[in-house]
Image: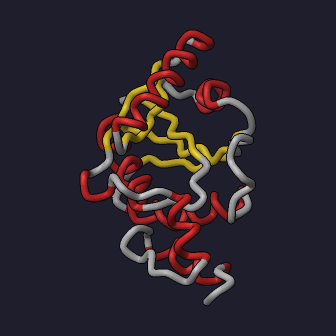
């Protein structure tokens, strides 16, 4: 089996992310979930340490069932994180054709810069609309995001939401 790196900001992790993690573990064997900081995105809702702890909570059942999933933080480029993690591939989840356009350009760039290939894993169709940005916004205003996030994430969102 192979080791894959699944990079993202995961601020917060949602059910689409979790689905990609599950599929990646099944397809490749070993998954390194790389919590990264994206300087082109706002600083986010949760610190890197909080995001890593939340991801750990959300994958605990998968690990208990035998999945080989590690959660690690990496600064900088995903290609450097893949090298450090010993990953054979980078995995990216796809929700829409727009995701494909962005991810395809990034995949070609990453391969040219490092030789690391990217594999796309489509999330389940019923989860394709979910976005961390929308979850943060809805939670900020006290809306219900329970159908979009694992229960540990919901608990953390309720704690930090200013309107709850």
163 vs 93, nearest the viewer: 163
Quadrant housing residue 10: bottom right
* Residue 1 sits above or below residue 72 on the image: above
Q: Is residue 27 left or right of residue 46?
A: left
- Residue 66 appears at what percent x and percent y? 36, 54
Question: How is the protein colored in the picture?
Answer: secondary structure
- Residue 35 appears at what percent x and percent y? 63, 48
- Residue 30 appears at what percent x and percent y? 43, 39
68 vs 21, nearest the viewer: 21
- Residue 42 appears at what percent x and percent y? 72, 52
Q: Is residue 48 left or right of residue 157?
A: right
* Residue 73 sits above or below residue 64 on the image: above
Count of all numbered marks drawn on residues in the image: 0
* Residue 50 sits above or below residue 104 on the image: below
Question: Residue shown at 27%/51% (left/top)?
Answer: 124
Quadrant housing residue 158: bottom right
Work out which residue is located at the far left of the displayed protein and give it.
125
Question: Residue shown at 34%/36% (left/top)?
Answer: 97
- Which quadrant does the N terminus fall into? top left
Question: Residue shown at 67%/26% (left/top)?
Answer: 80
68 vs 93, nearest the viewer: 93
Q: Is residue 100 left or right of residue 158?
A: left
- Which quadrant does the C terminus fall into? bottom right
């Amino acid at each position: 089996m192979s080791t894959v790196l699944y990079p993202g900001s995961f601020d917060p992790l949602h059910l689409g992310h979790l689905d990609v993690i599950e599929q990646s573990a099944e397809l490749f064997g070993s998954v390194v979930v790389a919590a990264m900081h994206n300087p082109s995105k706002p600083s986010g809702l949760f610190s890197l340490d909080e995001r890593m702890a939340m991801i750990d909570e959300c994958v605990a059942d998968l690990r208990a069932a035998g999945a080989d999933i590690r959660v690690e933080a990496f600064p900088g480029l995903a290609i450097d994180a893949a090298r450090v993690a010993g990953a054979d591939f980078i995995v990216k989840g796809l929700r829409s054709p727009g995701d494909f356009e962005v991810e395809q350009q990034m995949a070609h760039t990453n391969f040219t810069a490092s030789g690391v290939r990217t594999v796309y894993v489509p999330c389940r169709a019923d989860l394709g609309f979910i976005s961390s940005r929308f979850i943060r916004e809805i939670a900020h205003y006290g809306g219900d995001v329970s159908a979009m996030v694992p229960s540990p994430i919901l608990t953390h969102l309720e704690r930090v939401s200013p309107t709850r």
